[in-house]
């Protein structure tokens, strides 16, 4: 019996999630095969693997991951290794991939150039070994260009599939405001709490949900844990514990977004945040800060609102969008934006062209 064949082996992911499932689906739709070797820091990887019927294997422990990667390269024929370049394992994956003469595709998605000196040095070595580097945020392109990557660097932003679920009306949505992202300093969740305090003073019956606190999960997802603790302490300090709903990493994020009217995101980098795109596809009206790329997703007063990080102005922007008549105008345009400009099929075409032009 011949060896199993896949086009690509994907490594470097801490867990399998919806956004990876989106990609798995579109690869399968286009008859491109991919095998994922993933961790399970979320505790929900198997659920999403099953949901998307993905060819994926959960591997725990650093040494086990490298052993499994080498074993897979020996047992499975493949053209490419797709490496999510996060963590200290990246350099090992990259070296092994090149030793096995695979095309190395490196994915940059956010935090790679904000590491310590040693980690930054190792990331630059990984990029030198790469045959293709795909950056998912514009700010990453600027940093990556400094590594002299020339024509092997390209930009492909996030995208999502459009779902077939019926959209809920304003009255059917029972969550007024939602923040659904891992809390990080550059996402200014402490600022958002001050906004919520003023909103609740004026409208005490508002239903507000904050989801994404990985430190609350039984299997903790430690992304800026000190900042998450600071946010939770601030919630207690402001007396908001019983006034807003606080959730950890949630496996039912789509349902929460479907039930929400307003999606808030006061981050420094706004462009193509997955939860932002997903929320708009469910008819949430986005209220975002004037961070990087905000105006490339949100069209002011057309499909949402862009506002500077001023507590009073941000509060007023949310109140304007909560107005029933205004919301009814903005919500359909938010959905339309995703359908026309951020489809997963367009994402796949860009990935395919990038691979074919360089590999």
Image (spheres, rainbow, N blue to C red):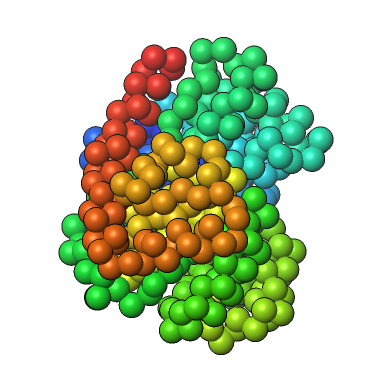
- Name which residue lies at 50% across and 78% down: 202
Question: x%, y% of residue 311?
Answer: 59, 61
Task: Tell me the quarter of the picture where residue 299 sits.
Answer: top left
Does residue 86 appear to the left or right of 323 in the view shown?
right
Q: Quick check: can you spot residue 160?
A: yes
- Name which residue lies at 42% across and 26% down: 79
Does residue 90 appear to the left or right of 296 in the view shown?
right
Question: x%, y% of residue 81?
Answer: 49, 32
* Closer to the camera in the image, 18 or 111: 111
Q: Quadrant of the N terminus?
A: top left
Question: x%, y% of residue 327?
Answer: 29, 61
* Closer to the camera in the image, 232 or 321: 321
Q: Quick check: can you spot residue 219?
A: no
Task: Tell me the quarter of the picture where residue 337 sits.
Answer: top left
Q: Quadrant of the C terminus?
A: top left
Taking the view exactly as shown, the residue that stands out farthest to the right is 117
Task: Tell me the quarter of the picture where residue 283 sits.
Answer: bottom left
* Closer to the camera in the image, 133 or 47: 133
Does residue 163 appear to the left or right of 105 in the view shown?
left
Question: x%, y% of residue 277?
Answer: 38, 50
Please determine whether, in this image, residue 29 is positioned above or below residue 200.
above
- Name which residue lies at 39% across and 72% down: 176
Figure disc tally: 0
- Name which residue lies at 41% across and 36% down: 296
* Closer to the camera in the image, 334 or 101: 334
Please determine whether, in this image, residue 137 is positioned above or below residue 163.
above
Taking the view exactly as shown, the residue that stands out farthest to the bottom is 242
């Amino acid at each position: 019996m011949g060896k199993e064949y896949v086009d690509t082996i994907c490594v470097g992911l801490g867990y399998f999630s919806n956004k990876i499932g989106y990609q798995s689906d579109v690869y399968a739709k286009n008859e491109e095969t991919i095998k994922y070797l993933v961790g399970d820091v979320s505790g929900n990887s198997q659920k999403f693997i099953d949901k998307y019927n993905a060819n994926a294997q959960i591997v725990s422990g650093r040494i086990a991951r490298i052993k499994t990667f080498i074993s897979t390269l020996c047992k499975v024929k493949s053209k490419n290794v797709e490496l999510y370049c996060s963590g200290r394992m990246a350099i090992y994956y990259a070296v092994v991939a090149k030793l096995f003469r695979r095309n190395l595709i490196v994915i940059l998605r956010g935090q790679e150039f904000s590491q310590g000196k040693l980690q930054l040095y190792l990331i630059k070595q990984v990029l030198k070994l790469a045959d293709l580097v795909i950056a998912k945020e514009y700010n990453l392109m600027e940093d990556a260009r400094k590594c002299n990557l020339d024509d092997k660097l390209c930009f492909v932003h996030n995208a999502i599939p459009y779902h077939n679920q019926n959209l809920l009306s304003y009255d059917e949505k029972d969550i007024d405001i939602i923040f659904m992202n891992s809390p990080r300093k550059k996402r200014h969740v402490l600022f958002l709490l001050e906004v919520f305090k003023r909103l609740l003073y004026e409208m005490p019956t508002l239903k507000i949900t904050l989801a994404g606190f990985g430190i609350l999960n039984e299997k903790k997802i430690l992304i800026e844990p000190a900042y998450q603790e600071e946010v939770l302490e601030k919630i207690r300090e402001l007396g908001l514990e019983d006034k807003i709903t606080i959730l950890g990493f949630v496996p039912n994020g789509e349902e929460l977004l479907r039930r929400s009217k307003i999606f808030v995101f006061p981050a420094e980098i706004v462009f193509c945040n997955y939860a932002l795109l997903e929320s708009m596809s469910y008819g949430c009206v986005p209220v975002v800060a004037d961070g990087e790329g905000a105006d490339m997703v949100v069209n002011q007063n057309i499909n949402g609102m862009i506002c500077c990080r001023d507590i009073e102005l941000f509060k007023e922007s949310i109140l304007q969008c909560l107005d029933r008549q205004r919301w009814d105008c903005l919500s359909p345009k938010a959905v339309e934006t995703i359908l026309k400009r951020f489809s997963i099929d367009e994402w796949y075409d860009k990935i395919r062209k990038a691979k074919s032009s360089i590999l």
